[in-house]
Image: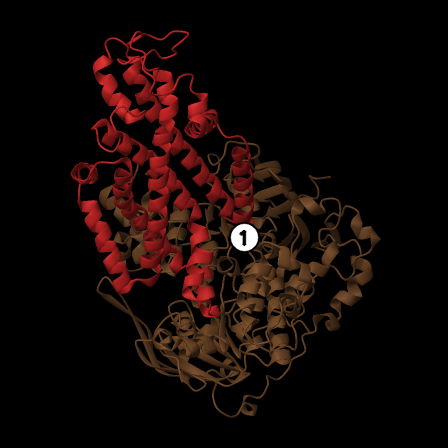
Amino acid sequence: MTGTVTAIDTGFLQSRRRRRRRAPSAVVAAAFVIVALVVLCAIGGHWLAPYPAGKQDLVATLQGPSGAHLLGTDDLGRDVFSRIIVGAASALTGPLVISLGAMVIGTLLGLLAGYRGGIVETVIMRWVDLMYAVPQLLIAIVVVGVLDGSYWEAVLVLVVLTAPGDTRIMRGATIAQRSLPYVEALRVLGVPGPRILLRHIWPTLMPLTVAQTFLNFATSLVSLASLSFLGLGVAPGAADWGRMLAEGRELIATNPWTAVAPGIAIALTAASMNIVGDWLHERLTSGSNR
Amino acid sequence: MNEIHMPAPTTLEVSGLTITGPNGPIVADVDFTVRPGEIIGIVGESGSGKSMTARALMGILPPGVSASGSVRYQGRELLPGKAGRRLSEDFAMVFQDPFTMLNPLMRAGRHVSETLRDERGRRLRGAAARNEELRRLAEVGITDASVANRYPFELSGGMRQRVGIAATLSCNPQLLIADEATTALDVTTQAEILDLLRGLQAQRAMSMVLITHDLGVAFSMCDRIFVLYAGRLIEQAPSDALARFPLHPYTRGLVDSDPPAERRVQALSSMPGSVPRAADVLGQCPFVDRCVFAADECRAPVRLALVEPDRFSACVRIDEIRGQLEEPTLVAATTVEAVPADAKHGEPLVAISQVSKRFTRAGRHVDALRGVDVTVYPGESVGIVGESGSGKTTLGRCVVGLETPSSGQIRIGEVDASDFAALPRRDASALRGVVQMAFQDPYSTLSPARTIGASLHEAVRLDATSSAPTVSELLELVGLPAHYAKRMPSALSGGERQRVALARSLARNPQLIVCDEIVSALDVSVQAQILNLLSRLQRELGVGYLFITHDLAVVRQVTDRVYVLRHGKVVESGRTEQVLDAPQADYTKKLLSSIPVREHTAA
């Protein structure tokens, strides 16, 4: 029968995959280290930083990197290195809330739309289409600009703008699962629909959710930074990477680190999050795929 | 010596072929020969290594798998060699799956002319290519010239297999290897393709290696048969001799587990367990753990040995047990009468009347069912027989509410179950306790990340009444030990998974189980176990079956009445033995005559 070749093939591939899984590549390891560092800084930044983030030293402004100031100081004499460390908190919390919020909303709506179909699906998906049709960052700028422009407003707007992407992905995946034999078997058995959705389909789609959440994290980190670069969402003077980037722009001739350091921090964190998300996705899917 | 006893010239001579994968040997020490113009069969169940053997001959082993030993083709040694290159002109292979072996972007004709060259070694073009394509397609029985211009997806399975064969023959091979070439086809198409292969083989005086799991196909086609088990050859014999009396307990078991199409037996003789991995049974008789004749000497290495003129067996005890092997008692193939259908009186459990189902996709209509009437009485086993496209699966899905009929009515007991979605929740839930379904592929119906116990418990908890069986009771019912509850589906063999699937459908104490091709993906020895299990459950629990299958021999063993479906219509129905013994409809006759005949009478 068909078994001979395929059975051996899959066994073989699995063992190979398992081998690869045991030793993540250097890039993945580096990404993990970076993410861990960012998380550490976000939690304990105030204790770790050599200087308080807001402490001005008008005598030592715009210094280059030195032993006392690893990345030099800005135009108000604030230590750039300390500000990067403390800035990790606002760089992390916002995107975390956005990606988790989008995950919850997107998963619920996507599962519902995909499994129920009909009018429920139509309403949800037309809303998604609408959100896709508008220029997202522009809407965010306008909304946050018109309101009083606080950080959490920006976060909330970005949650609403990110969720449609998750919804669309989850709906597609749910539709694909709905016609699979195991779901049909459960339906014939008489297992209620909500239980099938939450206890069977959702766990199967978990890897997808995880990957998408990490991806969203990276995207919203950049979006939030862009907003604060434009002066929205974060109060002036706060230790925030996007804000620092904007303020350091004019100082680039005297101490380039004031602009380069936050730029690198944003790019590295976003890239690391993507890599970690990809790796997790691969790991989770190879585990559940037979 | 050799010069004096010159054996018949051989086309292909394989000796000591060992195929090793990353987890140890897959095939160990296999010898066989193919003489010019001869058809040999390599027969084995899944896991026997037969496909790997074919791949080794063709030089297309998957990465990480290597072959050693000797493969001599017309005196030339082919191993070790560069993969794929050496064989292009003299051997060719027909693959199993006609649906994936053709390039979907190439027209049928191109597949045939792709490798054709003129005498100066140039690719054929234009009219020359076209003429050659048509000539070669005609050779495989395709006389409709428009077929050459069609894409694979526009062709039926049998047509694709013909195109595949024409493409394979384009290099004018002297040896054709057919790896399960007809397994994926309907029985009538299979008969046509086998006829075609036989005709081509005779016309071109080719040799052929037929690799199959189906003893019927092997007996009807081959001159000599090699039986492969767990990567080892355990018997070799001319096919008529093998059919008459196998000289190895495994072959005996294999022949006996194959359900006879011409009579119903009390219980199929089935071998316990399933095929072990080749690597686990290297130093002993590979069959020892399943063999009733096992003795201490079987634990030592065994080899294929001459036991009779022209016959080889790897059973070390063959001389002692021979008498018992030939004894018909082992066969247990006593003919029984089916339970008289007249005994089932009263109200029908399921009444399907004038049910039609039309699928519409992209503006095209397909009528899967056109006015089907089927009645099932309580405790009765009813067969639905048909080829692919007959609508038999759609019918089964309508009964359990996975599809909603376009018109007509399905009554289950007192309830109109035509549209499950429109039923009140309480009624729908009650119906689930009456009618259940078992699917073809038990693996894909079990959530891969859940243990067997969790999957069964999911089903058990739905039944609020105290009469609900426990997980361990369910496992016991289908003949599995209770500790299987802790296992994952991936740790089970195909037969065990099908048992679990049956156990799950039994969790709600149904009166009817719709069985959709539940044994068609299983090896014959395992199929026999499952069929016996179905009969036992029917006796013990009084559960009925709506048994959907393409296999007439199987339907004979487990059903009381049968409906023959074709293109969504019932063409014949009645008591199973009546329909199969004295078919009225032409289509039923054609189906029956397409079953490969075994030229023997076992008992």
Where is A4 relative to A154, above or below? below
Where is B568 relative to B190, above or below? below
x, y percent for residue B51 = 54, 48
Colour in which the image shows chain A: red
Secondary structure at badge 1 equals helix
Colour in which the image shows chain B: brown
Count the numbered circles shown: 1
x, y percent for residue B368 = 33, 71
Q: Quadrant of the N terminus of chain B?
A: top right
Identify which residue, B349 or A143, lies in the foreground.
Answer: A143
The answer to whether residue B116 is seen in the rendering is no
Q: Name the residue under label 1.
A: A3
x, y percent for residue B111 = 34, 47
Where is A227 relative to A129, above or below? above
| Residue B328: quadrant of the picture | bottom right
Identify which residue, A233 or B180, lies in the foreground.
Answer: A233
Q: What residue type is labelled 1?
A: Gly
Identify which residue, A135 or B47, lies in the foreground.
Answer: A135
x, y percent for residue B493 = 60, 56
| Label 1: chain letter | A
Q: Residue at x 49, y 82 (%)?
A: B579
The answer to whether residue A276 is seen in the rendering is yes
Where is A228 relative to B551, above or below? above
Q: How crowded is mark 1: few (under 14 residues within 10 Å), some or many (20 or more)?
A: some
